[in-house]
């Protein structure tokens, strides 16, 4: 999938996150969102292409959950997942595209 | 968050379109020539040997500042410390010199090397730590302080010597070179930059206040005193900083990727003089 498409999906996912934040999230909601984000981040780590912003959002999510702010925690976890997915997509795309940039 | 994603999207949308045909195979000799031709044609007024001076070869104002700073080079203390460390025997009586050709003097230009026994790229930094461990000493941190001092001294003893990197006739060596090239040209981090985005496509241009250095000869100045760090740093430290600057999580110092990209870039700099240790803004 093209990088731009992935980023558009990430933007939509992020917007959905904003909408769902209108409903009070629970600890279980946070755990589900956080697990998904961590799984995506694990894929990025395997490709040696984690983004610092993903790590920041994961930390933010954990801190919010620890403070009992589950709406914020879910939102940050969803953002982390979107970023991690974009980094994975970037790696997969670059696997094919990097030779195009080589000076010849 | 939305802003961050939009930034990434804007960068992807605005990214330069491919300039060259896709081909993941490697022909080091041909690529060496193409790489050199690219920089010399793009910067016809820059003397070939001057590329090793990085941003100072690109910007006259910066060059004047550097010349003034170089009267009292900020890396001088590291060179002195490294010299003393280098001459101090290990507990077993042996010394660093025993681990290197020519007792370690004037050999920096031959690193990184591809080690046929272990099948991997060995940088000077790695060779120094291997030397320490073989003599019962603990390895140093790969990013700064002691390692930066030792490599600063060794670079100093090689100043002016032409980079001399060999790719042995072994498919593993060619694979390491190719992986280094791949790392160099692969976009990464949220800002979607490759090493080449700055150092091939934009040398001489500014990113904020920094003047981007050309990739040609970029390893010849290592290690460097970087004003932004307020101290010395090794090649690994610089690569880790580059990763962070594009919002990528840095790899482990002296990881395979970093060693391979150093191998690739050093090969591209063959024949250019060692200028390290360097000083950078």
Image: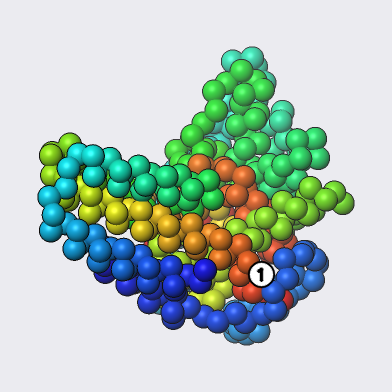
Output the chain of dot 1. A
Q: Which residue is located at x 85 percent, y 49 percent? A: B170
Look at the picture and state if A99 lies above or below B222: below
Query: Looking at this view, is B20 or B57 the one in front?
Result: B20
In the picture, the quarter occupied by the N terminus of chain B is bottom left
Image quarter of residue B53: bottom right
* Colouring scheme, one of rainbow, by chain, secondary structure, one colour: rainbow
- Horizontal side of residue A58 vs B272, given as left or right: left
User: How many residues crowd mark 1 within 10 Å: few (<14), some (14–19), many (20+)?
Assistant: many
Query: Looking at this view, is B70 or A66 the one in front?
Result: A66
Image quarter of residue B265: bottom right
x and y, in percent, of residue B163 in the image: 71, 57
Q: Which residue is located at x 75 percent, y 45 percent? A: B114
Query: Looking at this view, is B221 or A36 the one in front?
Result: A36
In the picture, the quarter occupied by the C terminus of chain B is bottom left
x and y, in percent, of residue B277 in the image: 53, 52
Query: Looking at this view, is B244 or B165 the one in front?
Result: B244
- The reply to whether residue B36 is visible in this rendering is no
- The reply to whether residue A76 is visible in this rendering is yes
Q: Which residue is located at x 57 percent, y 73 percent? A: B200
x and y, in percent, of residue B149 in the image: 50, 40
x and y, in percent, of residue B151 in the image: 57, 43
- Horizontal side of residue A72 vs B151, given as left or right: left
Residue matched to label 1: A99
């Amino acid at each position: 999938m093209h990088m731009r498409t992935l980023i558009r999906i990430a933007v939509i996912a992020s917007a959905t996150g904003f909408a769902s934040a209108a409903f009070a999230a629970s600890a279980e909601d946070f755990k589900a969102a956080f697990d998904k984000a961590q799984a995506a981040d694990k894929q990025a780590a395997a490709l040696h292409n984690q983004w610092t912003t993903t790590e920041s959002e994961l930390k933010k999510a954990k801190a919010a959950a620890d403070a009992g702010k589950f709406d914020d925690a879910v939102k940050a976890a969803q953002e982390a997942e979107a970023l991690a997915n974009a980094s994975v997509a970037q790696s997969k795309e670059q696997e094919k595209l990097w030779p195009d940039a080589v000076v010849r | 968050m939305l802003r961050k994603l939009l930034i990434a999207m804007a960068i992807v949308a605005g990214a330069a379109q491919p300039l060259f045909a896709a081909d993941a195979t490697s022909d080091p000799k041909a690529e060496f020539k193409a790489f050199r031709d690219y920089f010399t044609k793009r910067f016809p007024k820059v003397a070939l040997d001057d590329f090793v001076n990085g941003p100072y070869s690109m910007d006259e104002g910066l060059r004047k500042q550097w010349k003034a700073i170089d009267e009292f080079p900020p890396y001088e203390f590291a060179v002195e410390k490294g010299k003393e460390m280098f001459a101090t025997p290990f507990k077993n009586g042996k010394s660093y010199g025993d681990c290197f050709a020519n007792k370690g003097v004037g050999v920096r230009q031959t690193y990184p090397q591809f080690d046929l026994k272990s099948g991997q790229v060995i940088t000077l930094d790695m060779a120094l730590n291997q030397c320490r461990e073989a003599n019962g000493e603990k390895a140093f941190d790969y990013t700064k302080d002691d390692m930066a001092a030792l490599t600063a001294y060794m670079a100093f003893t090689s100043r002016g010597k032409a980079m001399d990197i060999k790719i042995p006739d072994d498919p593993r060596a060619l694979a390491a070179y190719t992986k280094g090239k791949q790392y160099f040209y692969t976009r990464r981090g949220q800002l979607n930059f490759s090493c080449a985005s700055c150092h091939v496509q934009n040398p001489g241009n500014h990113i904020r206040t920094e003047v981007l250095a050309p990739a040609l000869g970029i390893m010849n100045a290592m290690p460097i005193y970087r004003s932004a760090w307020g101290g010395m740093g090794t090649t690994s430290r610089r690569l880790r900083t580059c990763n962070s600057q594009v919002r990528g999580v840095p790899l482990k110092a002296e990881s395979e990727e970093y060693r391979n990209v150093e191998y690739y870039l050093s090969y591209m700099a063959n024949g250019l003089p060692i200028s390290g240790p360097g000083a950078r803004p």
